[in-house]
Image (spheres, rainbow, N blue to C red):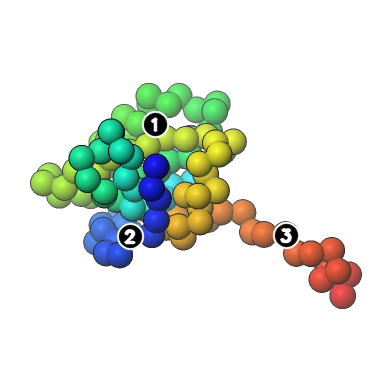
Amino acid sequence: MFIASPAKPLPQADAIGEMVRGITGICEAYLPHCFVMGVMEAPAQVLVLVIDRAANRERVLDSVGNGLALVVPPATQLEVFTIYEDDSLLASVRGTGTHLHCPPPLKKKPWWKILG
């Protein structure tokens, strides 16, 4: 899987971010440029959602689908991938800097900077 920051972010990124912030069960949301060989025909921006394990995944996806219908033009196809907080892919997704909702956790300061 190829994951990177998009050269031309979707113009609806802010509206998508606002929409996902209102959905319970989404911990983080990102809009990176992705390509999955054998799954996608061409590279594209993908909405990656970090879902709380306690949430009802289907209900979250239904809410996201309804919300996307309101903020993304009908001709725009936007794939949605869901992962959990312990997924090994999350570090790469966070590394793209494309967060829309709940920025990634701050890096801890080295112990010697905490003391001084």
Q: Is residue 70 visible?
A: no
Pair 2/3: label in front: 2
Q: Is residue 56 left or right of residue 40?
A: right
Which of 18/9 is in front? Answer: 9
**Residue where numbered disc 3 is placed:** 108
Q: Position of residue 98 (x, y in %)?
A: 42, 58
Which of 7/85 is in front? Answer: 7
**Residue where numbered disc 1 is placed:** 60
Pair 3/1: label in front: 3
Q: Quadrant of the N terminus?
A: top left
Q: Position of residue 59 (x, y in %)?
A: 38, 26
Please tell me which of labels 1 and 2 falls first in the chain.
2
| Extreme-right residue of the structure | 115
* Residue beneath the point at 82% across and 71% down: 113
Mark 1 lies on a secondary structure that is helix
**Residue where numbered disc 2 is placed:** 6
Q: Quadrant of residue 61?
A: top left
